[in-house]
Amino acid sequence: MALTINSTYTLANGVEIPVVGFGTWQTPDGDVAENAVLDAIKAGYRHIDTAAVYKNEEGVGHGIANSGVPREDLFVTTKLWNDAHGYEEAKAALADSLEKLGLDYVDLYLIHWPNPFAIRDSWQEKNQAAWKYMEEALEQGLVRAIGISNFRTHHIDSLLETAKVKPHVNQIYLSPSDIQEDVVAHNEKHGILTQAYSPLGTGTMLEVPALKEMAAKYRKSVAQVAIRWSLQKGFNPLPKSVTTSRIIENIDLFDFELSAADMAVIDGLKGSGKVASNPDEVEF
Ligand code: A2P
């Protein structure tokens, strides 16, 4: 069936998630975050992605509260930061995020990074302990789905050693510049939806000549071509913007379709912009 602005993916536990989400990484808290979320919801986004470390959960929460759209019609994600890998720590972190967001539940809660610098000698059991709490939060209805972010295949395998519930999503850096095929294949094998953060390569894809040519051909913008490619790959893109016109543009994706030949051209753009950070080497 053709994709529309109302299309959803169905997670392994039956929860529906809108195919395009609104990213808020690097969006400042306060009015900027609130207005960006208000613009996004007005433009038709029903899926908002934030994180404790973005330090904008309060502004995002105000946008949600003031949008006029019923809570149950929105899909809200937040993430557990690197200082909260553990059972009690995860419990406190989720409570704190819910309070900042002003919500009783989030639709999706993610472990943000698999291997924080401070616990590099013990990330395996600390992820497993955080996950145990997240499974309980799922049972208690504090979250509707649980997942991971920036996990590579060995991090997923380690978590699965003790998980009762498999992650519903894995949110990774994913643009034409870095498709992370091995992670995507591993996600698919385990029924994990691949979410794509920074589908514009944090802006680096916008200058790629092949994408510029394609955008002219389809009479769309480069951003729209890159996000549409992500959708047609079956990913769940989360474009970020604080600019009203771009927020509108980035979900105006449903009046064109990239041909198979053009999809293949974009698949070949590896290395043309930013690539993913190695989660085993990040210094945070
Ligand atoms: P801004 O937020 O100032 O509008 P990504 O989603 O890959 O992380 O990319 C986000 C970056 O790309 C931000 O700098 C954002 O700027 C910019 N951006 C988002 N949408 C567009 C667009 N449609 N055209 C140009 N730049 C965009």
Image (cartoon, rainbow, N blue to C red):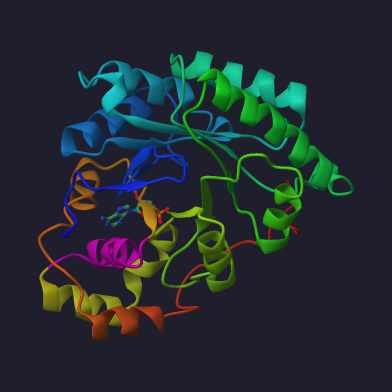
Across and down, in percent, residue 175 comes to 43, 66
Q: Quadrant of the N terminus?
A: bottom left
Q: Residue at x 26, y 63 (%)?
A: 228
Q: Magenta region, mostly helix, strand or loop?
A: helix
Q: Is residue 132 left or right of residue 48?
A: right
- Residue 90 percent coordinates (x, y): 69, 26
In depth, the one of 275 and 156 nearer the eye is 156
Q: Which residue lies at the image location 25% right of the left edge and 86% below the top edge?
A: 261
Q: Which residues are magenta?
A: 220-234
Left/right of residue 183 with respect to residue 34 in the rendered view: right
Total count of labels:
0
- The image quadrant of residue 167 is top right
Residue 245 on the magenta span:
no
Residue 153 lies in what quarter of the image? bottom right
Q: Is residue 162 left or right of residue 246?
A: right
Q: Which residue is at the front of the view, 24 or 44?
A: 44
**Front residue of 206 and 127:** 127
Between 263 and 199, which is closer to the camera in this rendering? 263
In the image, residue 181 lies at what x, y percent?
53, 72
Task: Please determine whether, in this image, residue 100 is positioned above or below residue 25.
Answer: above
Question: Residue drawn at (46%, 46%), measured in percent from left and top?
Answer: 12
Residue 229, compared with residue 38, is above or below; it is below
Q: Quadrant of the C terminus?
A: top right
Residue 36 in percent (x, y) is at 30, 33
* Snapshot quadrant of residue 17: top left
